[in-house]
Image (spheres, coloured by chain):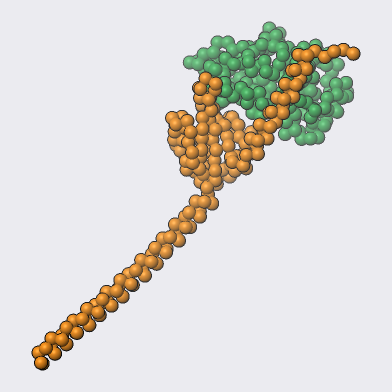
Chain colours: A green, B orange
């Protein structure tokens, strides 16, 4: 039995746009840390079985790859490694810690306002589709919304985003009470992906 | 044969160059034998090099996102250095005591410098730690030796003074006796 149903593969294949290879490399590092070389090898075998062979270690940091490939291997990883939502959030936090793009964006981690203002710029360095905006930033109430529009994605990817956003915001806000939660999702009949951030 | 889009060729070239440049920067950063970290204005560690991981015993992933004061024995010392570098933009060889993951304390010289953006606004800091533990040990040993030698010399000096007093006293007595002899000779004649 295939690790991902044909129906889901077809759905993922419809996702348009490209992702930068750096993002894939971040995932590779996480898989290697979590599942080791054998885990990555297993992922490659399962991807090939599904008819989408991909040599992960050949991914180049600054080349662009189809987003649907990115989503597919995440779903395969979820199924073969039995990853929970928390593992995907951990993946997101891990990515933000090692990301070259995050290093490029470090110059904006100087204030909460500046960090949120650059959300769109941040997103564009990773993906060719979708638009990320900050809404209702309220420093007094310690809350904001990150709204991702024109992007389909996949629920596992939303958990990664929760982790990634959490990590980046923790650089400019106290992490003790920091929470990032998706309150609207296109996979749950939402129009956009909306993340509520409180700290 | 289909001709390649010139713009696509340029983008491809830039991507490859960027990858090479990134690799060079990363390799250089990781090669540096001095423990270094980069922190933002909230004093949160955003990056560390391998030497810092080795020196402090923490993995980079454990430190990124943590306050730099985590590396110090006294948080107040981290604040003092932070305030100084904020004011003076650069601090060189400030002594401090840092804490390793295993709880061991180390004496280091801390150098720090601010990083500015193109508008000369401060956007972060670099912190470098040089281990002076061995140097400090040698210095203490040397100071102890100097102290011991000084004590020895003082004792010798006191002995010499005693000897000096004794010999001078003897000389004076001889002179006194010679004068007495002279005086008695005169009386006899």
**In this picture, residue B147 sits left or right of residue A107:** left
Extreme-front residue of the structure: B189
Counting the numbered discs, the total is 0
Is the residue A166 above or below the residue A193 in the image? below
Q: In which quarter of the image is residue B80?
A: top left
Percent coordinates x, y for residue A182 in the rendering = 64, 16
Q: Which quadrant holds the C terminus of chain A?
A: top right
Q: Is residue A131 shown to the viewer in this render? A: yes
Is the residue B186 above or below the residue B77 in the image? below
Q: Quadrant of residue B170?
A: bottom left
Percent coordinates x, y for residue A173 in the rendering = 53, 23
Who's the residue at 70% across and 31% down the image? Answer: B23
**In this picture, residue B84 sits left or right of residue B16:** left
Instruction: Name the residue nearer the viewer: B8 or A155.
Output: B8
Instruction: Name the residue nearer the viewer: B72 or B21.
Output: B21
Extreme-bottom residue of the structure: B188
**In this picture, residue B164 sits left or right of residue A116:** left
Percent coordinates x, y for residue A117 in the rendering = 57, 14
Extreme-top residue of the structure: A191
Who's the residue at 79% across and 29% down the image? Answer: A57
Q: Which quadrant holds the N terminus of chain A?
A: top right
Percent coordinates x, y for residue B152 in the rendering = 39, 67
Is the residue A143 above or below the residue B56 in the image? above
Is the residue A118 above or below the residue B170 in the image? above
Q: Is residue B82 shown to the viewer in this render? A: no
Who's the residue at 72% across and 34% down the image? Answer: A33
């Amino acid at each position: 039995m295939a690790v991902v149903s044909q129906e889901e593969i077809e759905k993922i294949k419809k996702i348009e746009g490209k992702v930068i290879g750096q993002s894939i490399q971040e995932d590779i590092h996480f898989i290697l840390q979590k599942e080791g070389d054998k885990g990555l090898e297993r992922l490659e075998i399962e991807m090939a079985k599904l008819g989408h062979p991909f040599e992960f270690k050949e991914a180049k940091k600054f080349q662009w790859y189809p987003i649907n490939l990115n989503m597919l291997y995440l779903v395969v990883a979820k199924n073969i490694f039995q990853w929970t939502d928390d593992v995907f959030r951990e993946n997101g936090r891990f990515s933000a810690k090692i990301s070259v793009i995050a290093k490029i964006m470090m110059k904006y981690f100087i204030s909460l306002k500046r960090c949120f203002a650059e959300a769109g710029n941040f997103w564009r360095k990773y993906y060719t589709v979708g638009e990320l905006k900050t809404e209702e930033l309220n420093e007094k109430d310690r809350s904001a919304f990150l709204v991702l529009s024109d992007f389909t994605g996949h629920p596992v990817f939303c958990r990664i985003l929760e982790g990634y956003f959490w990590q980046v915001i923790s650089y400019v806000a106290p992490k003790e009470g920091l929470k990032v939660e998706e309150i609207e999702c296109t996979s749950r009949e939402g129009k956009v992906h909306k993340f509520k951030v409180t700290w | 044969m289909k001709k390649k889009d010139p713009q696509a060729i340029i983008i491809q070239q830039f991507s490859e160059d960027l990858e090479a440049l990134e690799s060079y920067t990363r390799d250089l950063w990781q090669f540096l034998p001095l423990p270094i970290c980069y922190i933002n204005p909230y004093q949160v560690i955003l990056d560390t090099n391998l030497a810092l991981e080795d020196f402090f015993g923490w993995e980079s992933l454990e430190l990124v996102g943590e306050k730099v004061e985590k590396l110090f024995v006294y948080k107040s010392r981290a604040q003092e250095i932070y305030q100084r570098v904020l004011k003076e933009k650069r601090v060189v060889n400030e002594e401090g005591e840092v804490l390793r993951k295993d709880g061991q304390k180390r004496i280091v010289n801390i150098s720090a410098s601010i990083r500015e953006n193109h508008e000369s606004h401060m956007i972060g800091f670099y912190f470098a730690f040089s281990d002076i533990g061995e140097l400090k040990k040698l210095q203490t040993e040397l100071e102890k030796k100097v102290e011991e030698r000084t004590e020895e010399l003082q004792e010798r000096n006191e002995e010499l003074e005693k000897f000096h007093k004794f010999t001078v006293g003897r000389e004076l007595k001889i002179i006194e006796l010679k004068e007495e002899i002279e005086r008695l000779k005169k009386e006899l004649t």
